Image (spheres, rainbow, N blue to C red):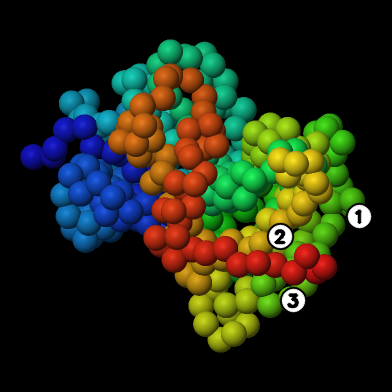
Amino acid sequence: MEQPESVLILGGTGQAGTGAAALLRRWHPALPLTIAGRDLDRAQRVADELGAATAVAIDLRRSDLGLPVDRRHSAVVAALWDDRLHGLRYAQHRGLPYLSISSGLVDIAPEVVAGAAQANASPILVASHYCAGTVALAALHTARRYDRIDTIRISAVLDELDTGGPAGIADLQRWSTATTAGLVRRDGVFTWVTGPDAQADVRSTDGTDLPGQSIAILDVPSLALATDAPNVRFDFAVGESAGRRRGGPASFEVRIDIEGTDRGGAPIGTSRYLVHPAGQRPVTATGIALGVERLLGLRGEAPAPGIHTPEALIDPAYAVERMAETGAAFITAPRDS
């Protein structure tokens, strides 16, 4: 018989879902998990590998997700694109915390409206940032020694072989269809940029430049509003990562550039990469697991009902510690590159 109060992971058989489940099992061995997917056999294999986990088949076309009415959960995680928001509504109707990672900046309006319409129903963690908010948290950790921040620029390389499987590819295609413009904060104003203004070279850790562009992503408003930085930009390139150019697997590479002043008022700048030799999967999984841990009150007090973002709930220093445990690291980037 299934243990009550388990975390329901929609898309628990995908790369992000399985990775997050594995981390939650490692961090909290007694936490019950429910691996939900369209293929019950596949979900059962994931559950068996985890141990103390249950497998269920779900139907995202149904408001009840195809689950028995007496099934109980402690939280709902959408580790996949839920275009009908049935996972969110399922959580709200039961007063459960909810986390999503696939909406993107251009798709969050329905989630926000649903959350506002039932503001007292559930805490909703909108984590459709790059790698489920971990990059924004890493940038905020880097920014901790600044007194004033003038500019934040994030430059990410996503290896074309590391897009997260069919679900990740579908997300990228949907976002690019919704808008080809990028969202930046320029001189304090959130601005859409297109054409040459949106284009940018993204430099990999080995010095290789990849053609990229500014994108519309939640990291921009999150970082801008968390730091009051008047200039924030997120550039993104898809191509061969430094790991593959060295003959290894696809690697994860994000450059964080920050300019501002220190506590004494002197101008300072920081340029460094957040890297992972195993690609984006463990970084994204860490973001999901951090969110679940916080929503359940397993670290800190459980948040109140309403809309939340990762930087509002998760301590950046703690997030960086957890990322490091999976193999992520910071390396210094040349300031003149």
Residue at the spot of label 2: 271
- Residue nearer the viewer, 301 or 172: 301
* Element carrying mark 1: helix
Please identify the residue farthest to the left as the structure is shown.
1
Placement of the C terminus among the 4 image quadrants = bottom right
* Dot 1 alpha-carbon crowd within 10 angstroms: few under 14, some 14 to 19, many 20 or more: few
User: What amino acid type is highlighted by mark number 3?
Assistant: Thr
- Asked if residue 75 is positioned above or below residue 236 in the image, the reply reads above
Alpha-carbon span between mark 2 and mark 3 = 16 Å
Name the quadrant containing residue 113. top right
Residue 152 seen from this side: yes
Alpha-carbon span between mark 1 and mark 3 = 20 Å
User: What amino acid type is highlighted by mark number 2?
Assistant: Ser
Q: Do the residues labelled 2 and 1 touch (CB within 8 Å)?
A: no
* Dot 3 alpha-carbon crowd within 10 angstroms: few under 14, some 14 to 19, many 20 or more: few
Alpha-carbon span between mark 2 and mark 1 = 24 Å
| Comparing labels 1 and 3, the label whose residue is closer to the camera | 3
Q: Which residue is drawn at 84% across and 57% down?
A: 199
- Dot 2 or dot 1: first in sequence order is 1
* Element carrying mark 3: loop
Residue at the spot of label 3: 208
Residue 196's disc number: 1
Residue 65 image offset from top left, x and y in percent? 33, 34
